[in-house]
Amino acid sequence: MGYYKECAELDRCHALDVYWENKEFENYSFYDGEVLVGFINLREVDDYVHFGIGVVPDLCGQGYGQQIVGMACELANEIYPEKKVCLEVRTWNKRAIRCYEKVGFCIVGEPITKTTPIGTGQFYKMMYDKDSKHNE
């Protein structure tokens, strides 16, 4: 699986358009051969890097998420070596939480309530531990 900083065919995945227009994000798309499998964005916020991910729904459960998260953490550490990587995930999204934990993320603190374009929900903040035994 490879990743690309630029995506010449943004219409292949409409969700990329939203992130691509915002220049304060580092954006990457991930392909398995010619097939787009997902994307990430990295955004520097204070003393950490906020990480966002999207995997093509039909490809969930095939191991792509874990590969993408691992590669994203490597990229974040290359681009922002002094910053911690964090993400937010809805508390009901057990599959995503397990995926993030396998790569080395840990839940930090209590759930928080946030309102997003798809509604209000409970979220966990998760921090990446680059020294985690999961990363070996």
Image: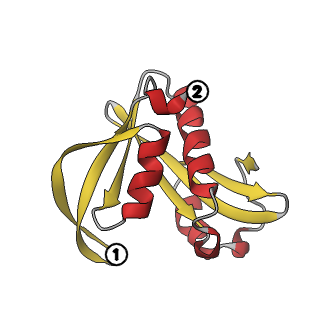
Q: Position of residue 68 (x, y in %)?
A: 61, 49
Give residue 97's quadrant in the image.
Answer: bottom left
**Image position of 44 (left or right of 66):** left
Can residue 132 be seen in this snapshot?
A: yes
Identified at 37% across, 62% down, the residue is: 94
| Image x and y of residue 2, in percent | 76, 48
Image point (44%, 23%), residue name: 131
Which residue is more in the foreground, 122 or 104? 104
Disc 2 vs disc 1: Cβ atoms closer than 8 Å?
no
Give the vertical position of 129 relative to 25 (above or below). above
Callout 2: SS: helix
Q: Residue at x 56, y 27 (%)?
A: 136
Amino acid marked by disc 2: Glu
Which numbered marker is on residue 117?
A: 1
Q: Is residue 24 visible?
A: no
Residue flagged by tag 1: what amino acid is it?
Pro
Cα–Cα gap, marks 2 and 1: 31 Å
| Residue 80 or residue 136, whichever sits in front | 136
Q: Which residue in the structure is indicated by mark 2?
A: 78
Whole-percent x, y for residue 20 in the image: 59, 60
